[in-house]
Image (cartoon, rainbow, N blue to C red):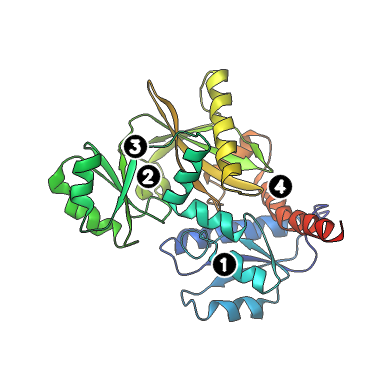
Amino acid sequence: MRKHPSAPEGVVGVLCGGPSAEREISIRSGRAVHEALRSRGTPAVLVELSQDLQQIPEEIRRSKISCAFVVLHGPFGEDGTVQALLEQMGILHTGSSPEASRYAMDKVSARRRWLAARLPVPRWVTADRYSAQSRAQEFLRFPVVVKPLAQGSSMGMSIVDHPEEMPGALEEAVRYDEEILLEEYLPGTELTVGILEEAALPIIQILPKRRFYDTVAKYTPGMCEYIVPAPLPEGMRNQIQQISLKAHETLGCRSFSRVDLILVPGRGPVLLELNTIPGMTNTSLLPKAAQAAGIDFPELCQRMLASAFNRQELCQRGATA
């Protein structure tokens, strides 16, 4: 098939795997993206990175790619590390810059920027395993959401209803990060908004068959239902999309992301987090939102790939201006 007019030249490497706890999810996403790109005639190779950080630069060099479609979830992939590495190696990459990736992965950094932009966020405090119990009792009322500061896919996340449940929740959280986020529990409707080419896609309502949208609900067939577009009044729909797009822009994100929110009765939409590298299987949320907008999975992957080339064009224009 005809190559997308904004596709980079040379071989595209779909980077997946890596050292994070979301390795297997990343590999599933990478395989789906690789197949989709090849179906559109793009010369692409699957580059399944090892868990050894010392070996990864050489693994990327051996792949002889000129552009990276990054599908590495969690730390190393979403915190700006691999983006900075690729830029040092002179390899184009999809998605956001190293700086924006760092801001988004660190939930506190993201929320501080959102607060400065007058965007709605939950009340929270940070702690470690030793101070969490007292911090929760001092600043928040139970139930409390306990989660690692920089992790995705709800890894290590718990809802704590009573103080005696805190030690178990802390042990789970510190498996993924020594720094912990304690957050007010907000009952409401879980929503997600995909951003593509700096525009908000149709909103998805998430209906987990568990208490919250945890790892089991996300990746176990039949444990979650989705409604797209979410059944919301037009005014509320527009407000949520505008908040999501502003959250994306405030962190300096580029081309695509996925913004998670909760719609709280009597309070309105509240931002939870932003994912710079959303899941990319055929059943993931960003592809579901794109499909509702009339964009099939191969076309979505091609547009995301174009973000690398479009950024190169902008840099070249700036250098010659």
Residue at image point 80% right, 53% down: 6
Where is residue 141 shown, x and y percent of the image?
Answer: 22, 36
> Contact, CB < 8 Å: mark 2 with mark 3?
yes
Residue at image point 72% right, 52% down: 302
Residue where numbered disc 3 is placed: 209
Farthest residue in the left direction? 164
Mark 2 / mark 3, whichever is N-terminal? 3
> Contact, CB < 8 Å: mark 1 with mark 4?
no
Kindly identify the amino acid type of the residue bearing the numbered disc 3: Lys
Estimate how packed mark 4 is, as few (under 14), some (14 to 19) or many (20 or more) residues with alpha carbons within 10 Å: some
Residue where numbered disc 1 is placed: 82
Mark 2 / mark 1, whichever is N-terminal? 1
Residue where numbered disc 2 is placed: 217
Q: Quadrant of residue 266?
A: top left
Kindly identify the amino acid type of the residue bearing the numbered disc 4: Glu
| Mark 2 vs mark 1, CA separation in Å | 28 Å
Q: Quadrant of the C terminus?
A: bottom right
Mark 1 / mark 3, whichever is N-terminal? 1
Q: Identify the disc placed on residue 299.
A: 4
